[in-house]
Image (tube, grey):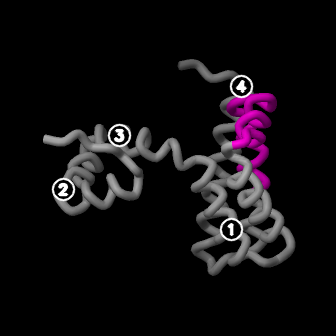
Amino acid sequence: MWLTDAQKIGVALTTFGGLFMLLGVMLFFDGALLALGNILFLCGLPLIIGTQKTFYFFARKQKLRGTICFLGGVLLVFLKWPFIGVVVETFGFLNLFGDFFPVIVTFLRQLPFVGTVLSLPYIRDVVDRVAGSRTSAV
């Protein structure tokens, strides 16, 4: 799959946004890093999938609660309430992107080392429950 130059920039912005948010959480909810991560993430997403598709993804009726929570969390981070903002933002993120978790788990299970760890008996049950994967009855 070939990416356009705008999509490559979007992937870089989104990746750096995720890294800045992770670093902001690791440094005890540093508001500046969290705000920068949110800005980079929100700028990178439309570059990856396009502005119209981004708007339709966030504006769907089924995703409205997740969109409000996610953008409300971003606003709380900007208003210097980083801990509460990240909690609200995480809830919104899970509501928005929770449908992708079974796909991500399926992909991770195909990786050499990670797939072996995720297939261990107790870990498999926990990951299936968290991802909402459906297992076939044996």
The answer to whether the residues at label 4 and label 1 have Cβ atoms under 8 Å apart is no
Q: Earlier in the sequence, mark 2 or mark 1?
A: 1
Instruction: Report, in whole angstroms, how far the alpha carbon at label 3 lies from the one at label 1.
Output: 27 Å
Instruction: Give the residue at mark 4.
Output: 5
Span highlighted in magenta in the image: 37-61
User: Which of the 4 image quarters holds residue 29?
Assistant: bottom right
Find numbered disc 1 in the image and state the secondary structure of the residue it sits on.
helix
- Amino acid type of the residue that numbered disc 1 sits on in the rendered structure: Val
| Quadrant of the snapshot with the C terminus | top left
Instruction: Give the residue at mark 2.
Output: 120
The residue most toward the right is 79
- Amino acid type of the residue that numbered disc 4 sits on in the rendered structure: Asp
Residue at the spot x=40%, y=58% of the render?
130
| Position of 6 relative to 26 (above/below) | above
Instruction: Give the residue at mark 1.
Output: 88
Q: Earlier in the sequence, mark 2 or mark 4?
A: 4
Residue at the spot x=66%, y=51% of the render?
16
Instruction: Give the residue at mark 3.
Output: 106
User: Which of the 4 image quarters holds residue 108?
Assistant: top left
